[in-house]
Amino acid sequence: MRINGTKYRTIWFENYTVKIIDQTKLPHQFVIKDLKTVKDAINAIKTMEVRGAPLIGATAAYGLVLSIIEKNDLSFLKKSSEDLINSRPTAINLKWAVDRMMKKLSGVNDNDILKIALDEAKEIVEEDVNFCKNIGLNGLKLIEEIANKKKNTVNILTHCNAGWLATIDWGTATSPIYHAHNKGIKVHVWADETRPRNQGANLTSYELNEEGIPNTIIADNTGGILMQRGQVDMCIVGTDRTLSNGDVCNKIGTYLKALAAKDNNVPFYVALPSSTIDWNIKDHKEIPIEERDSEELSHVEGLDKDNKIQKIMIYPQKSKVMNLAFDVTPAKYVTGLITEKGVCEASEQGLKSLFK
């Protein structure tokens, strides 16, 4: 997609270096950062310079390429793979990408391993682009149905950032919106602020603005009253891990949006590539829920009156802070799953009808 009229992807490989858009700098600064070692890749994932399940999977794949460039040694590669998997525990794409890379590299000789690793990482990237494009085409049909009935602007609520900045291109939740916009369908997006890191305000609104799509940032607790007023036609969110039974683990606050949508008969869709499906865990209580640094919640960052970026503390110094990054939305609150192979019911039967 575009930034200042120029087409970009979120990650690419150039001259033995991985290039990323540093998302901790957005929306006030646009910075392309070089990752030259596997430690750089791990740090980029941990600090959320890259974020979003598909993108951190791609970053991990390229991280293994950097590991081989740095030191073509099997024990170092295995240690790198473990460190990458442990860098963020909740998103399943991370482990999926690392496991896929390690399987591909198993038994490969030292002379060929770099080329094979780079080819596989690039294939993971291109697959994600195609998956996200097809998610958009499948989700477009849902938006079209509403537009044809309503004969007016379709209002879509989304949470966090499941846009192209969370993937390689197109995004998951935003892909149907981009396709609808490109087809001339009038859409408007309610972008949840998404505390504490404000990915909805800082990233989703930012990228929608760059594509000329009308959007409005709202506080996280505003969605319910908008649904009561009939100002939300549908919700589309992303997911960091979807269980085979249809339960969805996504950014904290997603569950509450699903409850409000259910109470107000608003369709609640989840957009995901198949790489986000966890076929092994059956109980959502087994999902490792990441708890991040309390400072993300207790401090805010932004531009001051002199156009300088400042971080300030907003909570009482003696207050305790809990910063859980994700929650789980049970399948019964999900209208449907939008995947690269089609739209299905949020259930094991639904997913298996497309993928097994």
Image (cartoon, grey):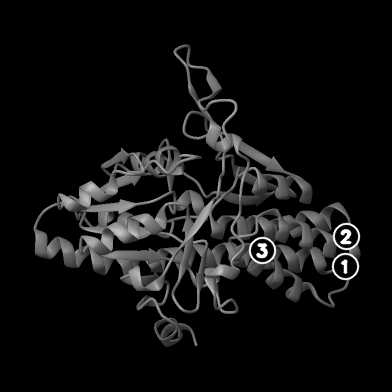
Decide if residue 192 is on the left or right side of residue 161: left
Image spot of residue 174 (x, y percent): 37, 55
Tag 2 or tag 1, which sits nearer the N-term?
A: 2
> What is the CA distance from the residue labelled 1 to the residue labelled 2?
16 Å
Say which amino acid is labelled 1: Asn
| Quadrant of res 259 | bottom left
Say which amino acid is labelled 3: Ala
> Quick check: marks 1 and 3 in contact, CB under 8 Å?
no
Which element is circle 3 on?
A: helix
Q: Is residue 37 visible?
A: no
The residue depicted at 83 percent of the width and 65 percent of the height is: 78
The residue depicted at 62 percent of the width and 59 percent of the height is: 58
> What is the CA distance from the residue labelled 2 to the residue labelled 3?
18 Å
Instruction: Determine which residue is flagged by label 2.
Output: 76
Vertical placement of residue 298 versus 139, above or below: above
> What is the CA distance from the residue labelled 1 to the residue labelled 3?
17 Å
Nearer to us in this view, 71 or 237: 237
Vertical placement of residue 100 versus 132, above or below: below
Instruction: Determine which residue is flagged by label 1.
Output: 111
Decide if residue 268 is on the left or right side of residue 144: right
Image spot of residue 212 (x, y percent): 30, 41
Nearer to us in this view, 118 or 176: 176
Tag 3 or tag 1, which sits nearer the N-term?
A: 1
